[in-house]
Amino acid sequence: MNADTLHVEVHASAFPAQRLDDLRRALAARDLAGKWLYESPAQAQAWLDYHAAWSPSRTDPALAALYGRAAAAALEPAGGRRGLHLVSLGCGGGHKDAALLALPAAQRTGGARHYTPLDISPSLVLTAATLVSATHATIAQPGAAPPPGGPAGPPALRIHPLVADLGHWPALGPWLDAQDGGRVRRLVTCYGLLPNFEPAPLLAWLAGLLRPGDGLLLAANLSPGGHAADAERIVAQYDNPHALRWYTLLLEHVGLPREAARLRVTTAPLRDDGGAWCIEAHAVLRGALEPTLAGQTLHLAPGERWRLFYSNRFTAQALAAALDAAHLALRRHWLHADGEEGIFLCERAPGA
């Protein structure tokens, strides 16, 4: 990277033809939740604004410190590999990545240092990459010889920005090997994905991404008392002016006028015991529409519901069971004092 350019790769899962096919499927299903919320620079900025205003990791110093302790523990040597490759899945704005890479243990890895900010949003990938580069004086790009870290400084950090759609469960192992030579320890962070993916396939994919000695830092939105006890209190994080503006931009991005629908934010249990539940945002159409979207004319009836967003919550016990089912061995965990957010350090279970 220099002052004027940044090398960014795009995985086939995010190529235009694939994206168009995915959008047509989403429109047919009336389900735009997930990746479509981050498509445009305006949407990405709206999410950054919402995250800064409402995410406890940004507004609560105690939770930010908890992430720091978890990161320090995850950087402790494991296995026989030296060096570090931080693979940030759903990198967002990169604030947690920059903080992790600034820790002393991330500076003294005994080998090469790599950083992959990965997201479906090119804007967020660029935001994370430039934020991290601003905190590290020596950045090497592909094909460039790394500048020396200096007698007392860390090795140069190589940044490998990648735009990819994890909803297609891409086989990233060969690509990661090409970036780091397959010789350094990888620390995979998955801070914001679990709430917005179906947990079983996501956790199984993460387990397949890890090699022996690699670590996984997984953050989860928790519900200490389950759906009945917690839903009314927690839903305010998703039903507020910042969130509603973000959802509305999704409607506008796909070509539906904002006045064509009213927004509703609701909750529902995913298990009979309430140990897993979700928050959902829907757009409910006010009247009939026949828009042409993604090259197709849709016939929309009054009262149709379009899902724009969902976020899953778990009790700690329900999440532990999901990790075990995915063959992810839990090594340590950290819970916020209110029990509503947890960070879990995992590795691939032996023999998995």
Image (cartoon, rainbow, N blue to C red):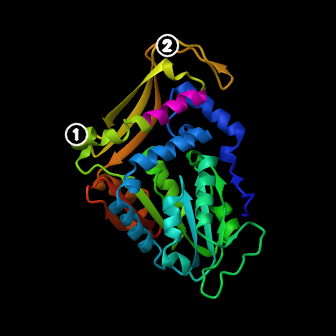
**Is residue 252 located in the magenta-colored stretch of the structure?**
yes
Is disc 1 placed on a helix, strand or loop? Answer: helix
Q: Are marks 2 and 1 in contact (CB under 8 Å)?
A: no
Location of residue 316 (image quadrant): bottom left
The answer to whether 272 is drawn above or below residue 143 in the figure is above
Question: Which of 179/270 is in front?
Answer: 179
The answer to whether 155 is drawn above or below residue 318 in the figure is below
Q: Judge left or right: residue 228 versus residue 7.
A: left
The kind of residue on which mark 1 rests is Ala
- Look at mark 2 in the image and give the residue it sits on: 301
Q: Which residues are magenta?
A: 243-254
The answer to whether 26 is drawn above or below residue 110 in the figure is above
Overall secondary structure of the magenta section = helix
The answer to whether 136 is drawn above or below residue 221 in the figure is below
Residue 90 at x, y percent in the picture: 53, 52
Residue 105 at x, y percent in the picture: 49, 78
Residue 72 at x, y percent in the picture: 43, 73
Q: CA distance from mark 2 to mark 1?
A: 33 Å
The reply to whether residue 199 is visible in this rendering is no
The reply to whether residue 8 is visible in this rendering is yes
Q: Quadrant of the N terminus?
A: bottom right
Residue 68 at x, y percent in the picture: 41, 68
Classed neighbour count for the residue bearing mark 2: other residues with Cα under 10 Å, few (<14), some (14–19), many (≥20): some
- Look at mark 1 in the image and give the residue it sits on: 228
Question: Which of 88/251 is in front?
Answer: 251
The kind of residue on which mark 2 rests is Ala
Is disc 2 placed on a helix, strand or loop? Answer: loop
Q: Residue shown at 50%/43% (left/top)?
A: 47
